[in-house]
Amino acid sequence: VLREVRAFLRLRHGPNLARVDELLEENDTFYMVFDYIEGSTLSDMIQNAGKIDPWECLGYMEDIAKALDFIHSQRLLHRDVTPNNIIIRPSGQAVLIDFGAARLYENNKTQSMTSMLNSDYAPPEQFAGEGHYSPALDIYSFGASFYHALTGEKPPNAVGRYMAIDKGKTDTLASLLQLRFDLHPCLGEIIHKCMKVKAEERYPNMSEVLVKITECKQKLAQEGPSSVLGSETSGSPKGEEIRSLLILLALILFGVGLGIALAIWL
């Protein structure tokens, strides 16, 4: 317990984290007092807006990825990354809060942890209560939270997804590209890799997630807003409809022009 208390105290130096102002002990139980953070939860923003703007979402993702990267460097797992535990300040900064479920972890060692979780955002291994835990646990929840932010829909239960895939059935997680065709492919790649049901198939750490987020931001900045729509139309139902309509319109215009030309010639 003392090791965890010391780790929690070190979190006050981390980026984009609710600052632990004080630790109190009473009846052999430690209580954390956090600074008040002004803003709205990501959950409330999703409820009000339906879907979060992709560029804004990338900024929030970068902030929370930095927060988790620091947490993991202290050998801690947050274990409760959800839209309810992400606050967006008026400045646009995203802050990760609520460390009530956080626990120390050790690589390559079987550990028992209380199964405190939110079933919409927790990975399959978190349901077990015992196993080999790593930053991959938080990485899944990170991806699931921002999947919800970008689509306006909560992702399906991870255990159900795991069972379906294990039986050779189709993954019940709908592709971001199908649910929202105005996203750049790089965003879909990041979210879906974070949400792999097998921990070893996810990003190995948040540092690598941060690299991918930076690369994605650079692509969006270089290609411009128009590229976001154009790049995602390929392969998505809505995109194919748009392409078909454009082809049909071109044929109609060609036909009209040809008819006028023939009328003049005759």
Image (cartoon, grey):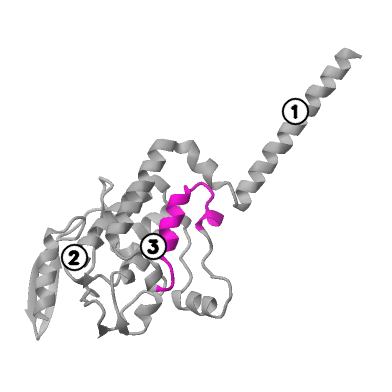
Question: Which residue corresponds to mark 2?
Answer: 73
Residue 56 x/y as whole percent: 36, 47
* Residue 161 sits above or below residue 62 on the image: below
Q: Main secondary structure of the magenta part?
A: helix
Circle 2/circle 3 CB separation < 8 Å: no
* Amino acid at pointer 2: Ser
In reply to whether residue 248 is colored magenta, the answer given is no
Which residue reaches farthest right? Answer: 266
Residue 71 x/y as whole percent: 20, 65
Would you say residue 47 is visible in this rendering? no
Read off the magenta span.
176-198
* Amino acid at pointer 3: Gly
Marks 3/1: CA–CA distance: 45 Å
Question: Which residue corresponds to mark 3?
Answer: 143
Residue at coordinates 52% horizontally, 44% vertically from top-left?
Answer: 231
- State which tag comes first along the sequence, 2 or 1: 2
* Amino acid at pointer 1: Leu
Depth check: 80 or 248 in front?
A: 248
In reply to whether residue 181 is colored magenta, the answer given is yes
Question: Which residue corresponds to mark 1?
Answer: 253
